[in-house]
Image (cartoon, helix red, strand yellow):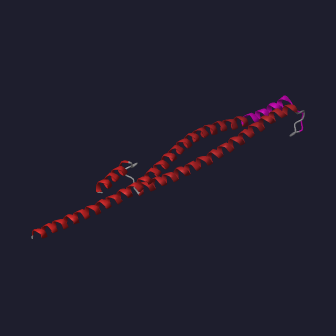
Amino acid sequence: ESNFILQEIETLSSNLFGMKTDKNKLETLKIELVKRKSLLEEIETRKREIEKKITINDSKIEENKKIIEKIRNFDICPLCKNKITDEHINSIREEANPKIEKFEEENKFLIKEMKEIATREKETKEKEFSVTFEIQKRQEDLIKLNLIYDKNIQIKNLQEKIDKIKEEIEKLIKNKKS
């Protein structure tokens, strides 16, 4: 019976994910997982902020381009009520173009940041998956380690019974000789 239990212990031990699995390691991994999830939430929030800002900038770019285009079609300026001249059109273009360039430049920066965030998000998701996998394996290890502990106790109990029986046999042999 003890040989069978020893084989069970060996089988359980050989299937362990990590020999240094304990509750503290598992708790550390769970804390890391919570941090990863929190980081992913922050990344998602920032992505939405960037997308919103890009949309607003695109809208402002279009708005300024339309102003330039519309002013060409008017005979009289809707703002100052004067006749529209080439000088007037150039003045509006000179006012709108820097705004357009500013919004386009900001969008380039935001798109670059979005790419960086996508890379960070991918890495974080991979790490989250890895930590989740490790948590699962270490939880399985704790179950196996508890089984190993129980098997060791069984072996100890069996050994105590064997020792007790040997002792009784020796007493019987002594008593028989006497």
Q: Residue at x 24, y 62 (%)?
A: 162
The quadrant in which the C terminus is found is: bottom left
In this view, 170 is above or below 34: below
| Residue closer to the observer: 106 or 47 | 47
Q: Main secondary structure of the magenta part?
A: helix
> Does residue 86 appear left or right of residue 143 in this picture?
right
> Does residue 66 appear left or right of residue 173 in this picture?
right
Q: Residue at x 63, y 44 (%)?
A: 47
| Residue furthest left as drawn | 178
Q: Residue at x 42, y 56 (%)?
A: 143
Percent x, y of residue 103: 70, 38
| Residue furthest top as drawn | 86
The quadrant in which the N terminus is found is: bottom left
> Does residue 174 appear left or right of residue 34 in this picture?
left
Percent x, y of residue 113: 60, 40
Q: Residue at x 46, y 49 (%)?
A: 134
Magenta segment: does it hold 97?
yes
How many marks do you count on the picture?
A: 0
| Residue furthest front as drawn | 176
Q: Say which quarter of the image contains residue 175.
A: bottom left
The answer to whether any part of residue 19 appears in the image is no
| Residue closer to the observer: 29 or 35 | 29
The answer to whether any part of residue 120 appears in the image is yes
Q: Which residues are magenta?
A: 81-98
| Residue closer to the observer: 150 or 61 | 150
Percent x, y of residue 111: 63, 38
Percent x, y of residue 65: 78, 34
| Residue closer to the observer: 14 or 37 | 14
